[in-house]
Amino acid sequence: MKKTQGKGIISKSKCYMLPLLVAAAALLTGMHYMGTVDNLKLQNNKLIQKLASLEGKFLSELDKDEFEVTAYEPSAKSCGKWAKFGITRSGTTPNRLRTVAVDPKVIPIGSLVYIEGIGWRVAEDTGSRVKGKIIDVFFESVKEAREFGRQKKTVYYNKA
């Protein structure tokens, strides 16, 4: 039998080209991806700066004061006889990313409140020990509430 060189589905010279083409395509795809990621990072940073500017302007229009910030959770120990209902004073279901208890004589129920180091919350609840410049942040467990403890924080809010 006679061997034929270069005959068959892929010749020897074409056999080396396929991996090179795959590698080049992968390199170009990676470069495009990295360019897209860099562009998105740049756009994201611009949006963060705009948001910080807008937030700063918004916060400057609110009242600012030092508050004692405490924590509460849905047990009867924290909420007393109201724990069995599982709702806030405003009628909402409390949420750890949204709910704070306030003195409605200082901060009206339904107000947006910004607590430095914590973020934006909604004044949805009250409490028997929440009087004056005290805010109670809702947590879902006793452990989280105890870990938070009592802290002094700068708070931005609308006065009642």
Image (tube, helix red, strand yellow):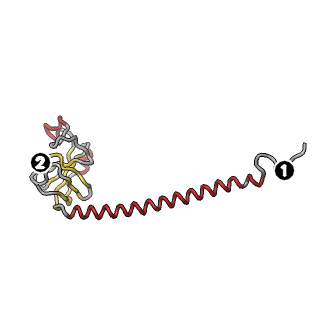
Mark 2 Cα-neighbour bin, 10 Å: few <14, some 14–19, many ≥20: few
Task: Give me the C-alpha separation between circle 2 and circle 1.
Answer: 92 Å
Judged from the image, the secondary structure of the residue bearing numbered disc 2 is loop
Residue 92's quadrant in the figure?
A: top left
Q: Is residue 35 left or right of residue 89?
A: right
| Secondary structure state at the residue bearing disc 1 | loop
Question: Which residue is found at the position 74% from the left and 53% from the top?
Answer: 14
Q: Which of the marked residues, 2 or 1, is nearer the chain's N terminus?
A: 1
What residue is rendered at 15% in x and 50% in y? 102
Q: Where residue 40 sits in the image (x, y, percent)?
A: 44, 59
Q: As drawn, which residue projects farthest toward the top?
A: 84
Q: Quadrant of residue 29?
A: bottom right
Q: Is residue 54 left or right of residue 37?
A: left
Residue type, label 2? Arg
Q: How many discs mark residues in the rendered view?
A: 2
Q: Residue at x 39, y 60 (%)?
A: 44
Work out whether residue 65 can be spotted. no
**Residue marked by disc 2:** 129
Residue 158 lies, in percent from the top left, at: 15, 57
Tell me the mark number nearer the camera, choosing from 2 and 1: 1
Q: Which residue is mark 1?
A: 5
